[in-house]
Amino acid sequence: MEVPAEDIRLLQGLTQAGWRWNETRLHYYRGQLADFEEPRYAVRLAQPAEAVGVGQIAAAARNDYDRFHADPWFGTERADAFLARYGAAATEGYCDAVLVPDEPSVPIDSFLAVSDLGQDAAALGVGLSRVVLTAVGPANRGWHRRLVSETVYRARERGASFVLMTTQATNGAVIRNAEKLNFALGSTTHILSYSTAMTSSTQTS
């Protein structure tokens, strides 16, 4: 469950009822895309044949503070496997685009998956692009900012008005990149989870 940070009574009630906090999320947005003037970087769309490789990047670039690795129900193995499958599925069509570096001397050790939020955009009457998953390995250090920058250009070229991006409150690197690219903080939420097995274990211990 995702709960706004302002909903204090609900958060207190859930935690008293056995729900566990896993992650605090910061939700950023970037408007005024016409004013975006970052340098351009060579990127391309990942191909379905690269799905397994993209999944491996997602699993290898582990973030111990994301909502899956922080949840005891998942555990490290299951969380890694989930992100590997998510990254692969994103490349196979689950997301609208997956961007990867396209420079001859740069190996592919990072990606950024984008959803254009078709139903939400239609309901709101405004074009949107959302960064749904990113992973950057050691061979692509510095490419998170570049991939996000190219995502903003992609959104502008598609006529979108906003780019959305979410990260953990612990992810200083992403927060710094968001600030450098003039993203604004829109809201803060908490992720909580509930498992009868975890609750029973707590009660009997």
Image (tube, rainbow, N blue to C red):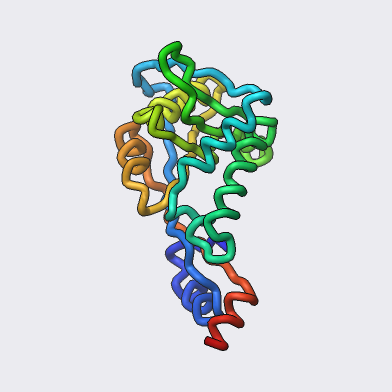
Vertical comparison of 81 with 1: above or below: above
| Residue 198 location, quadrant | bottom right
Where residue 191 appears, x then y in whole percent?
51, 61
187 is higher (above) or lower (below) than 39: below
Query: Residue 51: percent from the left, percent from the top?
Result: 64, 30
| Quadrant hosting residue 104 | top left
Determine the residue located farthest toward the top in the rendered image. 104
All told, the count of numbered labels is 0
In the foreground, 198 or 128: 198
Q: Tell me if I can see residue 104 in this picture.
A: yes
Query: In the shown orientation, is residue 195 left or right of residue 70?
Result: right
Residue drawn at x 54%, y 73% as measured from the top left: 19
- Position of residue 70 relative to residue 33, above or below, is below
In front of the other: 39 or 142 = 142
Query: Please, which residue is most extreme toward the front here?
Result: 77
Task: Name the residue: 38% across, 23% down.
Answer: 36
Name the residue: 61% across, 82% down. Answer: 200
> Looking at the picture, how far across and down is residue 78, in whole percent?
60, 54
Position of residue 182 in the picture relative to residue 71 (left or right): left
Q: Position of residue 25 (x, y in %)?
A: 44, 54
Q: Which quadrant of the rendered structure holds the N terminus?
A: bottom right
Q: Is residue 125 visible to us here?
A: no
Q: As displayed, is residue 46 above or below residue 14?
A: above
Name which residue lies at 44% across and 14% down: 103
